[in-house]
Image (cartoon, rainbow, N blue to C red):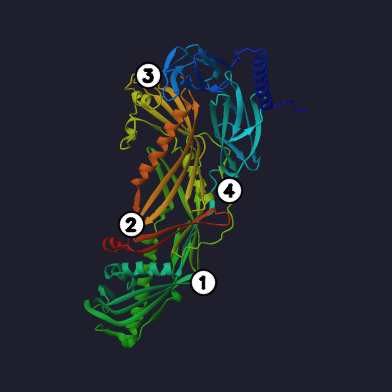
Amino acid sequence: MKSTSRATNRILDHITISFLILLVSAASMACGNNGTSTSNQNENGDDGVEIEITYPEADSFENRSRFRVRGTAEGTSTVEVNGETASVSGGQWEVLLDFNDGPATVTAEAADTSVSVDFFVDTVLPELVIETPDRGAVVDAADDDIVIIKGQATDEGSGLLAILIDGSIIDDEDGAFEVERPLREGINVFTVVARDRAHNETTEVRAVLHGPLADPSEAIDQAVTMDITPGGIADLAEVIEAYATPEQIMGFMEGGFGDSDLTVTEIDWDELTFEIVPRDGYLDIEVYITELHVEGDYQVDDANPDSGYIHITEMTVRLHLEVYVDDDGELAVAVPQDSAEVDLETSDIDSDLPFDNNTLRALIRGGIVFTFTDFVTDLITENLYDSGILTQEFEFLDRVIEIRLILEEVLISTNGVRVNLGIEFPADPHPEVQLLPGALHRATSSSTGSSLTSPFRLHSTRTALDRVLHSVWQAGLFHQTIGGDDLDGIRLPFDLTADGLASLLDQRIRDIHDTDTPVELRFRPLLPPVMEFDDNDEILVDIADFLIDFYLRPEGEDSTHILSVALYLTVEVEIVLDEHEVRFNIDVDADGDIAEEPIFTFDRDRTVNLITDLIEVIPQLAAGNLSIDGQANFEWASIGDLLLEINGESRDRITAGLTISPATDFIEDDEVDPSDDD
């Protein structure tokens, strides 16, 4: 049978002490003695003076060595308390006294009356050692779904009162504890507190990354999906229509009439409209032109060239545009020539060229079909689409990582266009990064669809974003050594010198090196960030076991390690669209723990609170100056009306909706060069 717990023994101790006090008091009264107890002594004279000590209480525990002793008194204007004189006002008195750790007594005296209170002073924190889990722990869901929290707490002062994990008291045997806790997928943070009878507390925090793990270099299929509705395709038609100026089309005319005796020198029209309708397997493109006027030089046999014109009242060109991913993973476009149609009546043709209208009709049909086929395919593959956008660079200070999107398939139906893209990750980790057994790869729940009706929609998953964050972390972008010029432009509330750090954390830092010695910060995140979505369509990023090492860097000497702090952060990112401006509201909830103290012991609460307060303020200052224009022009279009939505059965999918319109700068400044194959 298990022995009586330590907590039960403490309760019995208190009951026994209280019983003995009552027994001694009763015995004293039975003997007619006005004497004392060992913890609360009263000696009242016959002068009418009455004194009481109201704080501290008898047999209490105090965790301060300097505090105000308070009490009441009648029949006197002053009270002597441990040799210090306290004035009585309104029957109340108090005096500031110092005490040593251990058993202590307060004695208050006036005339022939005195009263004493015994108590215990303990200003020393309990010792707490966490044996498991280690910092930066990872538990694969294939292996287990629990973590064992094991450790030892001791207190040589007032004695250990309780051990708590996440606020709940746990059983212990003489301070030793070992408990199981369930794990959820993602980052799990556990706070262990050792509390003594004086309510001194020592806190240790540990984090565990849990979930299914995958090879960090393994690509993700269908990580991103882009949907373009029929309305969005109509918007793209407007972009193409705005771009189809006579100057742009002119560059393709030479190829269109290359096999004929006509060389085009000028082209113009009154109206040109593009209509694009998605069909099953292709896009149906219809180009309608009125008052088309073409001028050029023609040559019959070996005669000298002559000039002439062709004028068309109206005509319609129809093309079937097939869009697909070729064997090289690039976007490809094809227009089967047998699918091309031209509505052109011979009566709508006027020309001074020496050809009959049927010949002219055949000439124009072939030339116009070729011209607009070349124009549309070139515009899409060389201008509207740029394979460079598939490679995304993340850069911080001197480190860069490239993550590549992979075109997987293009699906066209009457519902619109869907483009599926995978993500390819770099394989080699940065040498400073502590390798993990794998990257978090949570299963994605079934899609519930998005309620967004935006014409352009991008869909991704929490899993894909987790993997991107893991790659950025693994590439060492967060593992940085910062000091001096690295922080130019960033205003901190203290100087990065020994003197500035001493003012912030501990005055003893000034005794280690000269006060102007530079401070160096080394960032060592032991775990990658993890993405979470909340019920308010907000994006959360959990960051745990993010170590910041504080070093002093004296010139010509090795750096001196003075402190390491482990941070546990939840970063809430809210994207707000204010008219045409997109703003980022960032809120950081930070906790921390002292991980290493190689020189001397810091005040844990003061140190952690100052650093976490600083961490919470800096992103807010950055967010106040961070915004993008919701109508910011890309090369060929303006993007606006950004919307975000979290969806999926487990709310682990994210959809971004936006609109698109022609970019004026692209229309005015860019020119298609059909001879440029690069």
Q: Amino acid at mark 1?
A: Asp
Give the mark nearest the N terminus, 3 or 4.
4
Q: Is residue 382 visible?
A: no
Q: Of the residues under marks 2 and 3, which one precedes in the sequence?
A: 3
- 2 in relation to 358, above or below: above
The residues bearing labels 2 and 4 have C-alpha atoms spaced at a distance of 35 Å
SS class, disc 4: loop
Q: Earlier in the sequence, mark 2 or mark 1?
A: 1
Q: Which numbered disc flags the more N-terminal residue, 4 or 1? A: 1
Q: Gap in Å between the C-alphas at discs 1 and 3?
A: 72 Å
Residue at image point 32% right, 67% down: 243
Using the image as rendered, state which of residue 431 and residue 590 is in the foreground: 590
Residue contact at pointers 4 and 1, CB within 8 angstroms: no
- Is residue 178 in sight in this rendering? yes
The mark found on residue 557 in the picture is 3
Q: CA distance from mark 2 to mark 3?
A: 50 Å
Closest to the observer, 466 or 605: 605
For numbered disc 1, what is the local secondary structure? loop
Residue type for callout 4: Arg
Mark 4 or 1: in front is: 4
Instruction: Residue at 53%, 62% (x, y): give it.
Output: 449
In this rendering, the label closer to the viewer, 1 or 3: 3
Q: Position of residue 635 (x, y in %)?
A: 33, 58
User: What residue did someone put label 2 on?
Assistant: 632
- Three-letter code, disc 2: Ala
Lower position in the chain sequence, tag 1 or tag 3? 1
Q: Is residue 569 above or below residue 638?
A: above
The residue that disc 4 covers is 442
Q: Position of residue 120 (x, y in %)?
A: 55, 18
Q: CA distance from mark 4 to mark 1?
A: 34 Å
Q: Quadrant of residue 496?
A: top left
